[in-house]
Amino acid sequence: MRVRRAGLRDLPGIHRVEQASFPDPWPLFAFLPYLLDREALALVAEEDGVLGFLLARREGEEVHIHDLAVAPAHRRRGVGSALLGELFRAARGARRVRLEVRASNRTAQAFYKKHGFREEAVLPGYYADGEDGLLMVRDLP
Ligand SMILES: CC(C)(COP(=O)(O)OP(=O)(O)OC[C@H]1O[C@@H](n2cnc3c(N)ncnc32)[C@H](O)[C@@H]1OP(=O)(O)O)[C@@H](O)C(=O)NCCC(=O)NCCS
């Protein structure tokens, strides 16, 4: 498995992983700004195709993770950790990484806590269906 910068050719694979991972997946076109913009932090993990992806942006002194998923059949093999590790390297110079996660998504919360994130705030009704979000942050060295 290797992690590399994502490009336009990864769009179908990223979309497939997204659809298998979320009840409310992003539409195909939503990925284009990340794949076309060199400033975006867009990564894929691949091994005979896309196993997982991470999309983030530098926002001032912060890096904001917008989307992260691993194909269900390949979870719990360190793919998500490899993507996050590469993001931390790419984010060097930023002060912290932040993200929002559904309050019900205990798996992702456990994953982020394992990687040093803490819960910073509850975001009431953050999601379109009314579910609360949790703001999670991690300081960078
Ligand atoms: C969250 C997600 C990206 C993790 O990817 P992954 O490749 O399975 O994660 P890793 O194998 O690197 O896991 C690293 C650690 O995270 C924690 N973790 C991961 N999955 C877990 C689970 N189901 N239950 C509890 N802890 C878990 C564990 O501490 C794990 O270490 P271990 O396997 O040595 O115990 C993946 O579960 C996923 O795609 N979920 C659906 C999409 C999603 O929720 N994305 C995040 C939205 S904010």
Image (cartoon, grey):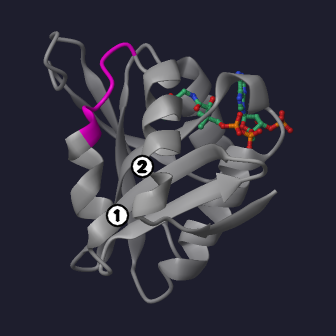
| In the depicted structure, whether residue 47 falls above or below residue 91 | above
**Residue appearing at x 24%, y 19% in the figure:** 132
Q: Residue 84, image x and y in percent? A: 60, 58
Q: Give the amino acid type for the residue marked by disc 1 in the picture.
A: Leu
**Residue appearing at x 28%, y 27% in the figure:** 133
Q: Residue 128, image x and y in percent? A: 13, 18
**Residue appearing at x 28%, y 69% in the figure:** 36
Asked if labels 1 and 2 touch by Cβ distance under 8 angstroms, the answer is yes
Magenta stretch: dominant SS? loop
N-term mark: 2 or 1: 2
Q: Which residue is the site of mark 1?
A: 35
Chain part drawn in magenta: 23-28
Residue closest to the eye, 33 or 70: 33
Residue 58: quadrant of the picture:
bottom left
**Residue appearing at x 40%, y 56% in the figure:** 55
Q: Is residue 126 left or right of residue 120?
A: left
Mark 1 CB near ligand 1 (8 Å cut) = no
Residue 125: quadrant of the picture:
top left
Can residue 138 be seen?
no
Mark 2 CB near ligand 1 (8 Å cut) = no
Can residue 51 be seen?
yes
Q: Which residue is the site of mark 2?
A: 11
Q: Which corner quadrant of the figure contains ligand 1?
A: top right
- Name the quarter where the N terminus is drawn: bottom right
- Name the quarter where the C terminus is drawn: bottom right
Q: CA distance from mark 2 to mark 1?
A: 8 Å
Label 2: how many residues lie within 10 Å, few (<14), some (14-19) or many (20+)? some
Q: Tell me the tag on residue 75.
A: none
Helix, strand or loop at mark 2:
helix
Q: Residue 137, image x and y in percent? A: 42, 53
Q: Give the amino acid type for the residue marked by disc 2 in the picture.
A: Leu
